[in-house]
Image (spheres, rainbow, N blue to C red):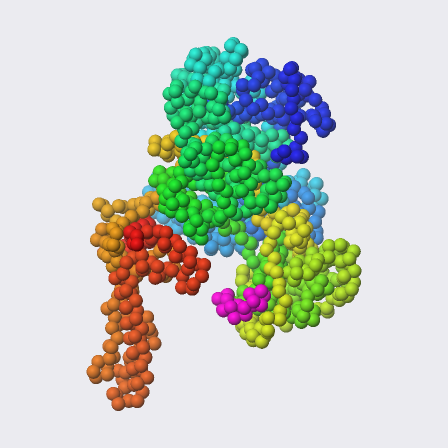
């Protein structure tokens, strides 16, 4: 079964769904009633039954949801009854703000803007550590972790308001600039004083101008703008709050350090209307596509639904597929319903709508739309069913109060799919599995679909859904059709919650192989090949030109930006359409990328980089939030001890000379860390007598614990106390918390847990058997006899700066040289191997998450920060991207529909027929949006007509050479310069960012350079030579000064001759490449120097291709830069 823990039963009864069944109190033996009823089609019960069930659900606290796909129309109706409480409207994490300062302003200055607060009133303003608090006026926060006399506030909720400062408009303050942000770090009183000076200056200037202005101008007001200070909030402290907290407002004067503000979202109560009421009184039903909603297109669908329900009551049947007579009756019923409702306030009838607002003016019913709805009423499409299934499954979850329900109808209509209703194309139907699809899209569509060649990249959550859709639609079932799917990953237990093709017995198997096997079982006619290959610039020998050129479509099901950018670049080069989508929890988006018609993925600026990086100084010395402790445990403890350290040690052990070469390329901080780690690993073996055992792992775990959670803390406090004493200023203020050290002589339970996890982690590193039994481990602790060393202040002060870089000054450089000298003496062949640990979050037996959890919580204990649950550590440290089966199904269904449009060839009619989507299933109807893809992004060339003045990413300049007539680099330069009226500066491998080039105008200038010594012994050196070989300047100067008989001349002459040889060699090399074929020049420059895999890979691609892709930098006579698209330089290969 799909989920053995989900109980499913069939209700088979001649009486249908009775009220008694619906109101049962013990559903499937759970002892609970139904929470929701989902109706999956209009065509399964009469209007009377539909409305009865809805009313019964409303009256008994049962959510009622309708999901209906009829033809090319999909409709959702959601009813959570007359009273529904939403506990969490969006599901977004609430803010936790760290308090940096609290101030009481006894009299609010005029320049300080706080809504509802008058000038002169007392106000308490809090400054938070975050640059942007993200809260609005009236939001609620709860005090937490407040200290000393303010501890009574903890748990109390208070409303907050934004704080702004008035600034003269003419001052043009950049609120995003560094100066303004630095100014906000000052106390509020000082910020106000600074802005008051600014105000006074510009106000005096304004008054002076007004004094000499005419009477009309003198009525002008002094122009001010309000700038929100996003790191400040004002507390709304009324008498009720102060009384319940048992404090006076003056308590805020006692603030010293610490404190958090946790955002609270108050519950929202909403009322929903019944199905009967909304069918009649939804005046402008929502459409998924915004333009159609604003134009009132939903009215015709709503009237179609009402008419079909009445048709069933009148005829005792549903409209037949392609039955024109039935369709005509439905159209007439819709007209009658519309006419009867006309004039009733709020009713749904055929009236004109502008920007979403009904006008009250008559319009004709869209008979084509209603007739199509009736003719296709008994058909369904795979994509629309998946869309509805995902959206409605998420809607059911909202019964719990989590997320905002849809309000209340959403329709989606795809009339462009009905492109050819020729009776012999859409019928007759003979009972095939594709009958519904043929009835809507046609037999010719089905034939084209069968012979499509599709490349699906990724077989995870998205990939499973897409494989399902491809199999059900019949893609690749023809003689020429095929589907390739590739994914390098293997199935993990955590995948089973959302990658529905897989079961427990598939764990450990390749995703692509398992997915292909399963959908092949569903549709044996499907030609599908599963691959386990990465798609990237290192697999172009497999995914070759022939492969890409054979495809009709690339379909992405990826989870990272870099891979998406690569497949997009391939589709750009081969002019192939690309279907793209992505999910993040309840949020999703999709994008249709059409050759030459739409923008591409690479036209955007998306990146995998974390935009909210935490400053390293905060992680290292001044954490104040649980996530700071998690990040430091991952970056500093796990990464350094178990990944970086063992990896560096193994490089040294296997080949110490290679290690020292790599060391020279590291930054100073990385160098010293690497050297210390290797020295530590070697010293550990010396202490253990040459062989690491579990007792040695216990000792090193204990040493780590003392160093990280005791010694470093004591050293930090010692340095801070010294600074405090010398400066006279308190150090531990705001978000800086004074840490406390652990003490093995008075152990807390966490210390033993740390030793258990860390010792077993080191056992994994050294290949030593772990000790899982807790009692046996405690005996090992006793056997080792751990003793805490006495702490003495370090001779070096701890870096207390708030910079992000650790100190790598003179002392560290001296230490590095000393450590290097010691390591040069080590015989690495006698060292014990170590096993670097690759972080794996999903293996509960490898101690990785356990180590991170206890390390996080020990650091939290040091700084008096709340502990983090193991799951929280796993999600944060594992960078787990939340994925939901509901969101995945919904977005994949919509993309399946876009694929149908591609097969129909609708791209030739314009991009407007296609839809991208941006949907958040958690946040209600307003977050269901689709829209047409953007056109290609034009890039200005800088050329003037008749030359191309712009191009897009889809464009390329193609140059083809006849057999035996390949251009030289010189001829290519001349061709480009003549064709476009430019001067070529550089020709290089397209997309590369290094200094290599097959042509560089600077190198060409070297042909004019000269180095020589005339008959009199005088040197002649071109000016350019000095830029390349600066050492010749001294030689040339001295040869000009020394007499011919001087014995010193010989040395300088030799230097000049050596430079001349080097220049001649450079000229010859350039001339050879410049005069030779472009393909030879490309290989000479870009073929890897060292023999091996990279060189073999380059040769394989070069042998297979008869072109190279080039980038060109050039300029005009006016020295303006010119931009060219990719240049595909083709040449005919020798067939011998």
Q: Quadrant of the C terminus?
A: bottom left
At x 53%, y 53%, the residue is 613
Q: Observer-nearest residue: 769 or 364?
A: 769
At x 77%, y 66%, the residue is 785
Residue 480 vertical position relative to residue 840 in the rendered view, above or below: above
663 drawn magenta: yes
- Horizontal relation, residue 954 to residue 712: left or right: left
- In the displayed image of the protein, which residue is found farthest to the top? 314
Q: Observer-nearest residue: 455 or 6?
A: 455
Q: Position of residue 252 (x, y in %)?
A: 65, 50
Q: Quadrant of the N terminus?
A: top right
Residue 226 vertical position relative to residue 663 in the rendered view, above or below: above
| Residue 64 placement: quadrant | top right
Q: Position of residue 996 (x, y in %)?
A: 36, 61
Count of marks overlaid on the render:
0
What's drawn in magenta, residue-wise?
649-666
- Horizontal relation, residue 27 to residue 1009: left or right: right
Q: Position of residue 115 (x, y in %)?
A: 54, 40
């Amino acid at each position: 079964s799909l989920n053995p823990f989900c109980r499913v039963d069939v209700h088979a009864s001649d009486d249908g769904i009775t009220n008694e069944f619906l109101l049962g109190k013990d559903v499937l033996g759970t002892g609970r009633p139904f929470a929701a009823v989902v109706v999956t089609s209009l065509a399964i019960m009469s209007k009377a039954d539909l409305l009865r069930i809805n009313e019964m659900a409303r009256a008994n606290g049962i959510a009622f949801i309708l999901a209906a796909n009829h033809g090319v129309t999909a409709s959702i109706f959601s009813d959570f009854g007359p009273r529904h409480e939403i506990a969490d409207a969006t599901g977004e994490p609430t803010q936790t703000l760290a308090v940096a300062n609290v101030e009481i302003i006894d009299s609010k200055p005029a320049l300080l803007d706080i809504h509802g607060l008058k000038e002169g009133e007392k106000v308490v303003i809090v400054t938070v550590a975050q640059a942007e608090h993200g809260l609005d006026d009236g939001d609620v926060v709860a005090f937490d972790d407040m200290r000393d006399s303010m501890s009574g506030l903890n748990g109390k909720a208070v409303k907050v308001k934004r704080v702004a400062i008035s600034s003269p408009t003419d001052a043009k303050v950049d609120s995003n600039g560094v100066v303004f942000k630095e100014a906000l770090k000052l106390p509020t009183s000082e910020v106000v004083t600074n802005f008051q000076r600014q105000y006074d200056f510009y106000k005096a200037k304004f008054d002076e101008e007004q004094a000499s202005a005419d009477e009309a101008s003198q009525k002008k007001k002094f122009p001010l703008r309000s700038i929100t200070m996003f790191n400040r909030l004002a507390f709304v402290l009324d008498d009720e709050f102060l009384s319940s907290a048992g404090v006076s407002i003056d308590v805020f004067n006692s603030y010293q350090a610490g404190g958090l503000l946790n955002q609270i979202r108050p519950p929202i109560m909403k009322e929903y209307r019944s199905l009967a009421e909304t069918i009649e009184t939804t005046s402008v039903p929502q459409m998924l596509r915004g333009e159609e909603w604003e134009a009132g297109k939903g009215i015709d669908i709503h009237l179609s639904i009402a008419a079909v329900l009445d048709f069933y009551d009148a005829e005792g049947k549903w409209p037949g597929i392609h039955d024109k007579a039935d369709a005509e009756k439905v159209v007439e019923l819709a007209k009658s319903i519309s006419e009867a409702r006309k004039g009733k306030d709020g009713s749904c009838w055929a009236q004109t709508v502008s920007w979403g607002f009904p006008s009250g003016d008559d319009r004709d019913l869209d008979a084509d739309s209603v007739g199509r709805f009736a003719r296709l009423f008994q058909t369904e499409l795979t994509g629309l069913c998946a869309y509805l299934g995902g959206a409605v499954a998420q809607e059911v979850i909202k019964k719990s109060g989590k997320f905002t329900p849809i309000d209340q109808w959403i329709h989606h209509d795809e009339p462009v799919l009905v492109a050819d209703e020729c009776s012999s194309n859409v019928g007759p139907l003979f009972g095939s599995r594709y009958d519904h699809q043929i009835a809507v899209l046609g037999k010719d569509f089905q034939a084209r679909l069968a012979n499509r060649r599709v490349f699906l990249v990724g077989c995870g959550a998205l990939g499973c859904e897409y494989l399902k859709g491809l199999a059900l639609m019949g893609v690749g079932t023809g003689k020429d059709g095929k589907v390739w799917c590739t994914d390098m990953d293997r199935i993990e237990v955590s995948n089973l919650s959302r990658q529905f093709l897989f079961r427990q017995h598939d764990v450990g198997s390749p995703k692509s192989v398992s997915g292909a096997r399963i959908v092949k079982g569903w549709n044996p006619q499907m030609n599908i090949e599963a691959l386990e290959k990465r798609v990237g610039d290192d697999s172009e020998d497999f995914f070759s030109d022939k492969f890409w050129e054979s495809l009709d479509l690339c379909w992405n099901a990826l989870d990272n930006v870099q891979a998406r950018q690569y497949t997009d670049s391939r589709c750009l080069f081969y002019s192939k359409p690309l279907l793209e989508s992505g999910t993040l929890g309840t949020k999703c988006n999709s994008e249709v990328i059409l050759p030459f018609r739409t923008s591409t993925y690479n036209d955007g600026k998306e990146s995998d980089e974390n935009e909210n990086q935490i400053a390293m100084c905060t992680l290292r010395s001044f954490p104040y939030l649980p996530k700071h402790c998690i990040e430091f445990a991952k970056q500093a403890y796990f990464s350094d001890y178990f990944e970086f350290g063992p990896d560096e040690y193994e490089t040294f052990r296997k080949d110490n000379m290679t290690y020292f070469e790599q060391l020279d390329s590291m930054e100073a901080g990385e160098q010293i860390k690497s050297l210390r780690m290797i020295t530590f690993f070697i010293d550990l073996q010396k202490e253990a007598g040459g062989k690491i055992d579990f007792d040695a792992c216990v000792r090193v775990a204990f040493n780590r614990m003392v160093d990280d959670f005791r010694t470093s803390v004591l050293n930090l406090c010692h340095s801070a106390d010294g600074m405090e004493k010398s400066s006279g200023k308190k150090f531990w203020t705001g978000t800086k918390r004074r840490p406390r050290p652990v003490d093995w002589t008075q152990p807390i339970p966490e210390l033993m847990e740390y030793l258990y996890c860390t010792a077993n982690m080191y056992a994994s590193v050294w290949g030593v058997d772990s000790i899982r039994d807790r009692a046996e481990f405690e005996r090992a602790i006793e056997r080792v006899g751990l003793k805490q060393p006495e702490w003495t202040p370090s001779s070096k002060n701890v870096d207390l700066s708030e910079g992000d870089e650790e100190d790598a000054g003179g002392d560290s450089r001296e230490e590095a040289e000393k450590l290097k000298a010691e390591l040069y003496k080590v015989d690495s062949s006698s060292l014990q191997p170590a096993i670097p640990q690759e972080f794996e979050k999903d293996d509960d037996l490898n101690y990785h998450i356990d180590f991170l959890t206890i390390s996080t919580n020990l650091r939290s204990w040091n700084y008096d920060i709340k502990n983090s649950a193991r799951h929280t550590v796993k999600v944060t440290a594992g960078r787990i991207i939340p994925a939901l089966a509901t969101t995945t199904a919904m977005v994949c269904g919509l993309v399946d529909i876009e694929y149908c449009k591609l097969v129909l060839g609708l791209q030739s009619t314009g991009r407007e027929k296609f839809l991208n989507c941006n949907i958040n299933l958690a946040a209600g109807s307003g977050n269901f949006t689709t829209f047409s893809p953007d056109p290609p992004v034009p890039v200005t060339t800088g050329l003037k007509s008749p030359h191309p003045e712009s191009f897009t990413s889809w464009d390329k300049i193609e140059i083809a050479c006849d057999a035996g007539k390949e251009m030289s680099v010189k001829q290519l330069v001349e061709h480009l310069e003549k064709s476009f009226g430019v001067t070529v500066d550089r020709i290089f491998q397209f997309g590369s960012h290094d200094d290599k080039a097959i042509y560089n105008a600077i190198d060409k200038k070297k042909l004019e350079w000269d180095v020589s010594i005339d008959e009199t012994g005088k040197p002649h050196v071109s000016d350019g030579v000095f830029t390349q070989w600066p050492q010749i300047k001294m030689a040339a100067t001295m040869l000009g000064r020394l007499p011919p008989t001087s014995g010193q001349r010989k040395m300088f002459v030799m230097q000049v001759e050596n430079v001349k040889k080097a220049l001649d060699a450079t000229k010859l090399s350039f001339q050879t490449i410049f005069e030779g074929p472009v393909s030879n020049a490309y290989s000479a420059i870009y073929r890897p120097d060292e023999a091996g895999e990279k060189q073999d890979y380059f040769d394989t691609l070069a042998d297979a291709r008869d072109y190279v892709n080039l980038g060109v930098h050039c300029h005009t006579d006016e020295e303006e830069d010119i931009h060219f698209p990719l240049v595909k330089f083709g040449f005919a290969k020798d067939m011998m």
